[in-house]
Every structure is written in C-alpha cells, then in structure tokens.
C-alpha cells in the first residue's frame, strides 16, 4: 500500500544542539514520521485504511533509538530537540507537534513538557493559559496566544491582541551574548542618521576567545600556499591505491595511471571523493604535482593530506568517514574536475562518495566575521572567507567568475577576481521582528564577494577594446594568474579603490597556477596506448573537452563540473528548501553533515558543558579584562570552590587511610589551582596562570571533560541565510587584505586597549566613496529570508 506523505507546516522551537550525549544512539526519523503522521492524519479527518507519514519532523527535532541490552530485541526510542527535555513516546510528542502545526510556535503549548505535569493540569484549563517552557526566551510571556494558521490555511484569532511585550537581552542557550543581535539593536538605536562601524569582538564568548587567534593564524598560513593546494574542509577527488612509481596523467580524454619507470599507461583509476581534514607539515612545491619529491623528510602521514571519504547527508550511517587515507598531492584532484576524471562512466559506475560529494555542492557558510558596518535599516558583516560548494575562498585569493547570461563567452571563464572582501549583507531590518527566536518575519541576508577584477576578453576591459594589456611580469597580477593568458583591467587602473561586487554564486573556484594546469592536462610524450583489455562497466563514448581557441582553455577547466554539480545538488540535497537553490549552514561540519573528523566526534558546540560552567568561565573573562567587579566576583567564586574542595578532603581524611586522604587533598589542590599536568584548556595557544586556573576547574571542582574538539576551521560560528544580491562596482569602503588581518588578529588587543569602535554620523555605509553602477545579474538573484 502506498504511503501518503503529509507536508508539515513551518514553525518550530526545535534545537539542533539538543542531541544524545553518548554515541550509542542511532538516528531514526522515519519511525516518528510514520507514527506522528498517522495521528495527524486522523485529526485532519483523512480517510482511514491508508498509510500516512510526515515529509520530515519539525526543524530541530530528531528521532533516536538504542537497544536496551545486548541480545535484547527491545528498542527504546526518543525524540530530541525540545529546548528543555526529551519526548519518550508518540503520545508525549504529538500534542507538542500538533500545537506547532496549528500555531507555528510553542507559545501556549499544552504538552506535558511545556506545561509541566499534565496529570496535575486542570482539564478545563484553556490552551491560552498553558505557558511554554521555552517559546521565546527573550520576551516576557503573556496569557494570550498570537494568531496562527490551522493546517488548512485558515486564520484563527484568540480575541484581544497580546499586551506589549518587554524586550530582554538576547543570548544563546549557554548564556553567551548574541553579538550580531546586539549590534543590530545598536544600529536601530542610532537611527537612519548615524552609521555604526565596529569590530566584532565577542569578549564574553569563551569559544571566540580561545579560537579566533588560531583561526587568523591558520588562514594567514593558507594564503602563502599555492592555489592548487587543498585546504581543510574542502572536497577533493582522490585515488586510494597508487604504486610507488605510479602517477596520474591526462590522455586527452580522462586521467589514467602511468608507470614512470616503464612509461606504460595503465587503466583508469577508481576515483573516490572526500573531505581534507589534515594538511602536510612539510612545504608543498610544484614537484609534488606529479610525484613525491625525494627531498621529503617525512612519510605520507606527515608530508601528505589526510582525506576522509564523505558520507551521505541526513543518513545515520557515517562509516565512510572512518575509511580515511593519507595521500600525496599527485593522487588528488579538485572536485570541480569530476567530469574529466569520470569521463565516459555512467552514474551507476561511480563510487558512492562521488554522489555524496556532488549532493553538497550547493552549500555555503561564512567564516571569521570580524567587522560590522551599517546605517539603519541595512548593515554589512565582513568575513574572512567562505566555503562555497567544494572549495574555500578567502581574502587575497584569485577566484574564477562564472560568465553572466548573455555574455559573448557564456560557456567560458574569462574573468578572475582577487578577493578583497567577503560580505554578508543584512537588509530590510526595519521590516523584521526583533526576536530572532520566534516565527515572525526575519531580515533578509545575502552574501557578496568583491575585489579587483581582471579579464581575458578585451571587450570586457575598462576601455572596451583591450588597448592596454597588463604586462606579464606586472605585480598587479596575482601569482596564480601569471602565464595563463593575456589580462586586462575591468575597472580603470587609475582608480585603485574601484572594486567589482558579485553574488557568491558567481564564484567557480580558485584560479589554479599554470604549473598545476600543465601537470594535470599535459599528455606525456611516448605514452603507450591504452590496454585493449580495459573496458569500463556500462561505457559511454569518450568525448574530448571542447574549449574555444579564442581564450586560454585552461582557465575554463572545471566549469562544466561546477555547473553540473550544482544541478545535481539541487535535485538531490533534501535540505534545500522548496523554491531555493542553496543550503546555508552554520558551519562546514553542518554543511557536509559529518559527525566525525580525524577520529573524534564533532559538533557545533559541546553538548556536555552546562550554563553553570559557562557562567564561571565568563566571570573569569571579566576578571582577565579588568572589568569593574569582575575580579572580586571571580575570587569570591573561587574561594567557595576552595572551601568545598577542602571540606571534601577533610571528609575523606576522616573516613579513609592517610594515603587515600593525602591523595584526595593533593588532587583537590590540583583541581582548584589548575596545575594538574600543566593542562591549559581546550585552546592551542599558551595561557596565563589565571587562565589555566579557569579552564582546569568546573562547577564541581573537577577538570573539564567531554570537550568537543575544535574542528580547526571546519566550524565557523556564523549563521547566515540564503540569497545573493546583484553584482556591483563599488568604491570606498573595502577592507583591504592587510587591514582585515590586522583587525581580526588584533581584535582582543584593541578591545583591551579601549580602541574598539567608532561611530560616524551622516556618512552612510560607504563613507568616503560612492556607488558607480549596479551590474544586472538577474540569474544570480536568490534573496531569501534569514
């Protein structure tokens, strides 16, 4: 019997961070989708006898199950995602689900968790007086339920409008201040006549204080590498098994193995797709593109890349992740070249990870927000980089731009941009609700990339005829652009502040150096013919890659792969909302839907730490920053812990032997003073004695445990919403590469020195410059609600 799928209504109070604390649970949404779907269909009056199931659980909720004991057939099932508790049965969860479907939020939810103990609730009590445990934590609750929609779309009213609600400070679930909401509130208070221009400094976020300096150093080191070197978090194609004398070569149609000693070409290799989780500790040179240099001092585990095969999204089976492989650079290719690597093979012959990687080609997340600038009702957040599909793009990179519809060279890449700013724009703030946790309309966001732009099409040059080509040895050209064609300025070179701004969807990927393109796509001399015995399963005719002779063909390598990959992702990624074309994630971990990196479980935050521990850390941060009352408050809390540890030691001393008591007292001292084995906390930077004291103690006097690994740069802490805006040529407010790194790396020092922000009046977002003109790029417009 066919199952009828019921589409749920928008609106949820679910929280993605509320998940099981141990790894013995299995994700299983389908059980709850079927159970709740049957109950909802009955309430809606659908015909009996048919089978019903939800298309998904409400956002933030997830079903989990585990066996009760080894050998037992009994399975315990739960629904996680409620802000305060766990649902243990369909009868518990359905009232909450039904209320979300009817009202779009949890305000007034009558379920057992939201209303307290349902057994003690008066049956005659109205729904309007049952208060949600957590509908929106930033406004005072009322006894009135706002208007909502029933499943049929009709509007129902609950009488009088709710009284004016009082705004409270918005924080996350761990009590950390929402810095973006704080800046938006400050922008609103300044009004339309004043501009707000501030560095983003999250002084009360322990995660930011630990990680932001390391992030800056990591990104700075990446800028020194050639563009062809894969970066952490990027998706690549790789060949798992290559002999010591083997390499990969191009035969005009696809890649094949080649024995360097005998010069005999072998069969095409088996390609897999994975995510780079470790980069080599030794320097990478052009020689690595074709073989392992004899000068390498370490084996492949240190001189190569760790690549973990990528699992399927929204699938509890993540076993591919554990089949990692350490690889030399010549066994790796960018994911954008997947059509060249798999030329002639049908989808049924692909390795499963190829499909998994293509499924996430339409994902995007920004990284390293450092600057907030705006004038009500619009604002811009400057970021250090963004993961766009398979690759990471940061300030200073030379990136290839997708040709616009109607361009003369519509199927070729002719333009390259040297990125000077990655911007997340917040628009229509005056039309949005102040509470980011409710289901009212939110502000719109769009991400743009801007920078100095160059072209190989003379008609696209600033003079329209390409009269002044850029010399090959000019310092104006990015190193990766040299040697791959003749370049022209798109903007007038006399105006050094002029920039082109485009939606992030125009970015194809980095511009690879000539050395890489030559190594990958040069046919070796004297190559032996392909063995006659080689026959792929379900072969397709091998067709050469066609490129135009009017432009450098190497610049367009990977364009068909990116475009077809995005089409594949749009059709196969279930997380992309209807009517949208991209999935915006909080972090790279969420974008790829990986649960394990480098053999350790990863998450957006540590679910085992609690608000009490975070509050203790924040008191220590206030003390370190010298804030009034912070030092006294911190020492008072520390004295309480010392007394408690002393009391425990005395109890042990009276109840046990002298050896046990002495060990307990010594351990208590280590725990209080933070000198157990020199532990300095979860960060990688050295810390002061006071900081070590803070990180080593918890609310119960024991060292911090269960801290989720920092995922290096796989977990950027930002949540944008989808939708690029139109491209434009701008001048004036761009943060140059040097300025960005000086600001981001020295943000904490600037904070302590008091030189944190400045506010100007009447200058607008682009003070000191003017907008020249907006390019029309309708095909890339996709502005969504946040």
Image (tube, rainbow, N blue to C red):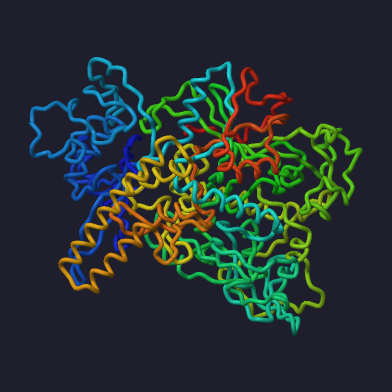
Q: Which percent across, then down, holds residue 14? A: 32, 41
Q: Is residue 636 visible?
A: yes
Does any portion of residue 55 appear in the rendered image? no
The image shows a total of numbered marks equal to 0
Which residue reaches farthest bottom?
262
Extreme-right residue of the structure? 467
**Residue at point 26% right, 21% down?**
156
Residue 638 screen position, x and y as percent: 33, 49
Is 206 rendered above or below residue 712?
above
Closer-to-camera residue (65/471): 471
Side of 574 where 4 appears, left or right: left
Please indicate whether residue 238 sits to the left or right of residue 413 in the image: left
Q: Nearer the viewer, residue 161 or 267?
A: 161
State left or right for residue 303 relative to residue 413: left
Question: Is 596 displayed left or right of 482 in the figure?
Answer: left
What x and y, as percent, mark residue 41? 22, 40
Q: Is residue 87 above or below residue 578?
A: below
Viewer-proximal residue, 340 or 281?
281
Residue 521: where, in percent of width, then height? 75, 64
Residue 519, compared with residue 12, is above or below; it is below
Q: What residue is rendered at 34% in x and 30% in y?
A: 138
Q: Quadrant of residue 418?
A: top right
């Amino acid at each position: 019997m066919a199952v009828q799928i019921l589409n749920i209504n928008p609106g949820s109070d679910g929280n993605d961070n509320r998940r099981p604390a141990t790894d013995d649970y299995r994700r299983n949404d389908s059980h709850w989708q079927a159970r709740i779907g049957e109950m909802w269909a009955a309430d809606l009056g659908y015909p009996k006898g048919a089978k019903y199931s939800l298309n998904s659980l409400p956002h933030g909720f997830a079903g989990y199950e585990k066996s009760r004991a080894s050998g037992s057939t009994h399975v315990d099932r739960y629904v996680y995602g409620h802000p305060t508790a766990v649902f243990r049965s369909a009868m518990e969860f359905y009232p909450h689900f039904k209320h979300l479907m009817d009202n779009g939020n949890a305000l007034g939810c009558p379920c057992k968790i939201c209303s307290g103990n349902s057994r003690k609730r008066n049956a005659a009590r109205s729904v309007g007086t049952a208060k949600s445990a957590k509908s929106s934590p930033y406004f005072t609750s009322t006894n009135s339920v706002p208007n909502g929609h029933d499943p049929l779309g009709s509007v129902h009213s609950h009488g009088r409008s709710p009284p004016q609600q009082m705004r409270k400070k918005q924080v996350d679930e761990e009590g950390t201040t929402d810095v973006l909401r704080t800046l938006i509130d400050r922008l609103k208070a300044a009004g339309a006549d004043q501009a707000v221009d501030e560095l983003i400094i999250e002084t009360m976020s322990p995660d930011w204080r630990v990680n932001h300096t390391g992030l800056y150093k990591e990104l700075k080191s990446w800028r020194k590498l050639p563009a062809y070197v894969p970066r952490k978090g990027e998706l690549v194609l790789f060949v798992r098994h290559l002999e010591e004398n083997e390499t990969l070569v191009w035969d005009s149609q696809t890649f094949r193995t080649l024995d360097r000693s005998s010069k005999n070409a072998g069969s095409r290799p088996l390609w897999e797709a994975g995510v780079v989780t470790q980069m080599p500790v030794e320097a990478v040179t052009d020689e690595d593109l074709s073989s392992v240099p004899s000068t390498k001092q370490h084996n492949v585990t240190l001189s190569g890349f760790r690549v973990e095969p990528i699992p399927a999204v929204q699938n509890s089976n993540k076993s591919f992740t554990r089949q990692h492989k350490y690889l030399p650079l010549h066994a790796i290719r960018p994911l954008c070249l997947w059509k060249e690597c798999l030329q002639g093979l049908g989808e049924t012959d692909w390795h499963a990870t190829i499909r998994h990687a293509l499924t996430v080609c339409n994902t995007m997340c920004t990284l390293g927000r450092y600057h907030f600038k705006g004038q009500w009702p619009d604002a811009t957040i400057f970021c250090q980089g963004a993961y766009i599909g398979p690759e990471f793009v940061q300030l200073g990179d030379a990136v290839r731009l997708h040709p616009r519809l109607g361009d003369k060279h519509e199927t070729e890449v002719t333009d390259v941009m040297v990125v000077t700013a990655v911007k997340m724009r917040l628009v229509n703030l005056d039309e949005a609700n102040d509470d980011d946790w409710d289901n009212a309309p939110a502000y719109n966001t769009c991400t743009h990339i801007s920078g100095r732009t160059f072209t190989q099409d003379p008609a696209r040059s600033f003079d329209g005829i390409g009269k002044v080509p850029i010399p090959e040895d000019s310092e104006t050209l990015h190193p990766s652009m040299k040697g791959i064609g003749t370049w022209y300025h798109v903007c007038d070179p006399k105006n050094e502040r002029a920039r082109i701004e485009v939606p992030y969807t125009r970015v194809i990927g980095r511009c690879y150096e000539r050395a890489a393109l030559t190594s990958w796509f040069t046919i070796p001399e004297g190559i032996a013919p392909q063995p006659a015995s080689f026959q792929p399963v379900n072969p397709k005719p091998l067709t050469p890659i066609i490129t135009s002779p009017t432009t450098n063909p190497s610049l367009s390598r990977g364009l068909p792969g990116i475009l077809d990959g995005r089409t594949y992702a749009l059709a196969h990624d279930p997380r992309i909302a209807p009517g949208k074309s991209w999935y915006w994630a909080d972090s790279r971990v969420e974008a790829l839907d990986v649960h394990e990196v480098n053999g350790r479980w990863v998450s957006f935050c540590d679910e085992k730490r609690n608000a009490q521990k975070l509050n203790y850390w924040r008191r220590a941060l206030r003390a370190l920053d010298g804030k009034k009352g912070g030092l006294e408050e911190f020492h008072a809390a520390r004295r309480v812990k010392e007394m408690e540890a002393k009391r425990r030691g005395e109890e042990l001393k009276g109840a046990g032997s002298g050896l046990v008591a002495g060990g307990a007292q010594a351990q208590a001292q280590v725990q209080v003073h933070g000198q157990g084995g020199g532990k300095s906390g979860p960060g990688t930077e050295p810390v002061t004695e006071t900081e070590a004291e803070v990180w080593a103690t918890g609310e119960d006097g024991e060292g911090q445990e269960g801290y989720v690994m920092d995922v290096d740069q796989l977990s950027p802490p930002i949540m944008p919403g989808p939708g690029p805006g139109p491209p434009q040529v701008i001048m004036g407010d761009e943060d140059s590469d040097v300025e960005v790194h000086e600001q981001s790396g020295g943000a904490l020092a600037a904070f302590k020195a008091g030189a944190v922000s400045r506010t100007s009046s009447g200058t607008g977002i682009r003070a000191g410059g003017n907008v020249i003109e907006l390019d029309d790029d309708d095909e890339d417009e996709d502005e969504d609600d946040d």
